[in-house]
Image (tube, rainbow, N blue to C red):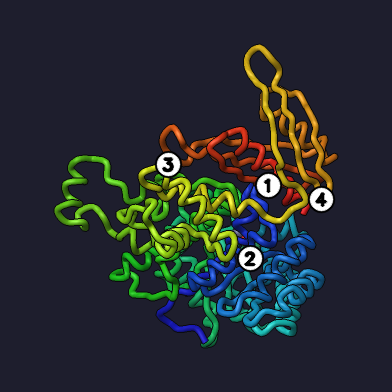
Amino acid sequence: MFEPNRVYFFDTTLRDGEQAAGVNLNVQEKLQIAKQLEKMKVDVIEAGFPAASPGDFSCVQAIARETRNSVVAALARTREGDVRAAAQALAQAEKPRLHVFLATSPLHMEHKLRMTPEEVLNEARAGVSLARSLAAEVEFSAEDACRSDPDFLIKVFKTAVEAGAVVLNIPDTVGYAVPDEFGALCRKIIEGVAAPEGVIFSVHAHDDLGLATANSLAAVKAGVRQVEATVNGMGERAGNSALEEVVMGLRTRSDFYGLTSALETKRLYPVSRLVSRLCGTAVPPNKAVVGANAFAHESGIHQHGVMAERTTYEIMTPASVGIPQSKMVLGKHSGRHAFEERLNALGFELTGEALQSAFERFKALADKKKTVQDNDLEAIAGQLEQTLPGPIELMGFVINAGTLIDGTAIIKLRVGERVIQKVAMGDGPADAAFKAINEIVGQDFTLDTYQLGAITEGGDAMGECVLRLTLDGRTVTGRGVSTDIIEATIKSYIHAANKLLG
Ligand code: KIV
Ligand code: ZN
């Protein structure tokens, strides 16, 4: 049963979020994110779209198996094959939800579905009924709801309820709505459907006009009680409502909304870091709630105000969203406990050997640097996160580069049981290294994007490389960190190659 004054959070980072261009997470990465989402107490984790690919199917299956507290949702079109695949992937879930969607706008019905409104009603009934026969909880989404005829939407939702849906989702699929209008549409639908107790309305807003969060909040004000959102607002095209923005909007303005949620907001920042790292998508510094500058006060007047009384210019505290209070400096005398705690706050959960190894690296760095900052820790732990088991391991390299010679790389790799070394020339050191790796592995990986940056400050800064590699139509992100940017580059390439071959 849903509580009337509570907003339920449906996180779709692993489904719609992963539809963001160039993002491709593997099973381990999705599981890692799902575990953190569950810890943050999101109500529902949408784990994927099982009919889309065998990879998606396995991810949903793995998350369903390992998640105990959050509901696990799987997406399906109304067609039988999709619904059965989603039900099968959810078979081991403690709390499964089958999420069925069908488009309802004239545009989509005519050009995409090639169905009449009558046929769409029948299709919705059939899809939801089948889903209900296979899963305890069914959500129905009317795709492109904001460009649909509201009276037709009411009919479709009534049909979905009769067929067994308990969550009725109103998606702004193309990010077309504006808040007043969206709120009014939600209100009209809620009144028109007059759903029985035990049924709630949901929204799923896209950010094409930068209004996703505003639209989601307007919908909540109108009576909607589930919000679909993603961490950092990731998603198809301009993305989705950002989970951290909606929840902090509701919490900070509880005087206006008067609603609660179960979400542990102190976990927002660590989860944001984790998602950014694993997806290879940087969070803009001015991003609301979790951006690097979200709590930075630059102007003298503001600084003075905050020092005198924090609330003069701060409407929420960094601590409330889990931004580490870096006041406690980590250095060579810091203990393992403080180190581990800070890592957790940054979204890492290292255990056993990995934790020990990270601690040793931290101590070694602390010997060189007076204080170790959060980005140093991210670099240290990130290095371990990358050493995913995979067939390729870097044994060593030599690079020759300059303005007077072609870039030349000697790369030595362990590939399975064999150690192979090759020399290659290229257009600069990175290109030469990539060519040598391709030759050793015998694969023609294509480099799509390549970014280099410094993640810590000073002469001994850690360099970070994030790149995207494609093989046979599959694209993955690779990340490498090192004080040597060439090593970071080679490591990131191998990280991605291991994902593609693993
Ligand atoms: O944007 C959308 O309409 C969707 C649905 C599948 C809910 O992602
Ligand atoms: Zn969407």
At horizontal 74% and vertical 56% (from top left) the residue drawn is 112
Position above or below: 209 against 1: above
Q: Point out residue 205 in the picture as x, y percentages from the top left corner.
A: 53, 59
Q: Which sits earlier in the primary sequence, circle 1 or circle 4?
A: 4
Three-letter residue code for mark 1: His
At horizontal 32% and vertical 51% (from top left) the residue drawn is 295
Three-letter residue code for mark 3: Lys
Disc marking residue 368: 3
Three-letter residue code for mark 2: Leu
Q: Which sits earlier in the primary sequence, circle 2 or circle 3?
A: 2
Say which of 192 and 315 sits in front: 315
Q: Is mark 4 within 8 Å of ligand 1?
A: no
Q: What SS does tag 4 mark?
A: loop
Q: Quadrant of ligand 1?
A: bottom right
Say which of 159 and 302 sits in front: 302
Between label 2 and label 4, give the one nearer the viewer.
4
Q: Which residue is mark 1?
A: 495
Q: Quadrant of the C terminus?
A: bottom right
Asked which quadrant contains residue 206, the reply is: bottom right
User: On the rendered structure, is 184 left or right of 350?
Assistant: left
Q: Which residue is mark 2?
A: 31
Between label 2 and label 1, give the one nearer the viewer.
1
Between label 1 and label 4, give the one nearer the viewer.
4
Q: Which residue is mark 4?
A: 416
At horizontal 71% and vertical 18% (from top left) the residue drawn is 406
The answer to whether residue 122 shows anywhere in this view is no
The answer to whether residue 331 shows anywhere in this view is yes
Q: Which sits earlier in the primary sequence, circle 4 or circle 3?
A: 3
